[in-house]
Image: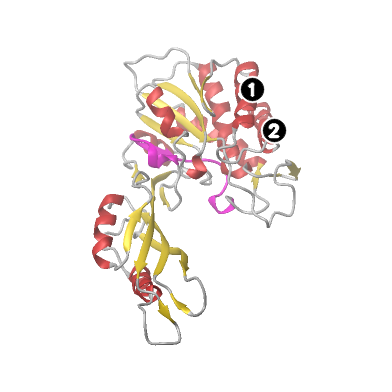
Amino acid sequence: MDIHTITEEAITLLCQLIGTPRISRQETEAADLLQTFMTRRCGLDVCRSGNNLWTIAPGYDASRPTLLLNAHIDTVRPTAAWTRNPHEPVREGDRIYGLGSNDDGASLVCLLQVFRLLCQRGGMPCNVIYLASAEEEVSGRDGIESVLPQLPPISVALVGEPTGMQPAIAEKGLMVLDVTCHGRSGHAARDEGDNAIYHALDDIQWFRTHQWPRVSPLLGAVKMSVTIVNAGTQHNVVPERCTFTVDVRSNELYSNAELLEAIRPHVQGDVVARSLRLGSSSIPESHPLVQRAIALGRTPFGSPTLSDQALMPFPSMKMGPGQSSRSHTADEYILEEEIAEAISLYLSLLIP
């Protein structure tokens, strides 16, 4: 197949996926569609676990390294700001509009086409696995985390996410904290009680101003943002309890456990982490996959956004069509030329 045919087929599949709602944890219909395409159209032997699909290129040899090509099926929920039907694919000029077109449908279909071409070509120096995973947008436990134990050992992964086809070689992690500050209730008209909000304000100020000393050359400093605050029952009662949520984006110089341990002595409230499993990830710039990307004129960078890389216990590089700035936005779109470019660059990256 020539690049034009390959690209048009990828666009057709993308439009079908856009027309199939696939919000996280509701990907069954989209996974069915993709599985049917992979088996009937592509002739691939597809394995499935939940809404995760994977296929291994013929000629697997356990003595060789294994490359994982991964992108996710699911999308976020559309925002109220959409001016068009988010589940109706629309091609206008070079643009393809629709929820999940940019994040992560374009990477999903491009990597599938590349996998098919690699299978047809043969002679790869490594094993290749294509994985379309679920629940990425919510870091769900029934997503990639549940599949990796079922796969052969992975040496390195190429993760398709919108990066403008530039290689992200480091990615910030995520830790969500729930902080509870305690006081004592009392009548607001009298000088009584102990206002939990005031304790929370002191803690919030610390989260707002604290500077972590280890700054990554790729990812910058650890970023902490207070995003939700709740307190009080009525206007004339001093609140005895105030809760707030903190979004912590870690760099590769701190583990989430280390950050949590360091935070607790500095605040008055009780601090509980929802999870420590989404740590920062990175791949050495000296890795052959990164060096190949550099040789193709690509520029390595550090990504502030989280992906399933956080759940991969092996080196991974994030690189895909589209722009991260379009992700999770109203009237999301991908350019047809970005899809064509991605397929060509992926092939150049993987075939020396």
Q: Amino acid at mark 1?
A: Phe
Say how the picture is coloured.
secondary structure
Nearest the viewer among 262 and 300 is 262
Q: Is residue 111 above or below residue 164?
A: above
Residue 306 as seen in the image, left or right of residue 104: left
User: Considering the image in quadrants, where does the N terminus appear?
Assistant: top right
Q: Is residue 310 magenta?
A: yes
Residue drawn at point x = 59 percent, y = 34 percent: 27
Q: Which residues are magenta?
A: 308-326
Residue 279 on image: x %, y %: 35, 46
81 on left or right of 321: right
Residue 102 visible in the snapshot: yes
Residue 82 lies in the magenta-colored region: no
Task: Pick the residue in front: 260 or 327.
Answer: 260
What numbered label is drawn on residue 163?
none
**Residue 284 in the image: x percent, y percent?**
31, 41
From this view, report whether residue 44 is shown above or below residue 77: above
Q: Residue 67, percent across and down?
A: 41, 27
Mark 2 belongs to which amino acid?
Answer: Gln
Q: Are marks 1 and 2 in contact (CB under 8 Å)?
A: yes
SS for tag 1?
helix
> Mark 1 = which residue?
37
Depth order, front residue of 252/110: 252
Q: Earlier in the sequence, mark 1 or mark 2?
A: 2
| Relative height, residue 314 to residue 184 (above, below) | above
**What is the quadrant of residue 74 in the picture?**
top right
Residue under label 2 = 16
In the structure shown, which secondary structural element does the residue marked by tag 2 occupy? helix
How many numbered marks does the figure carry? 2
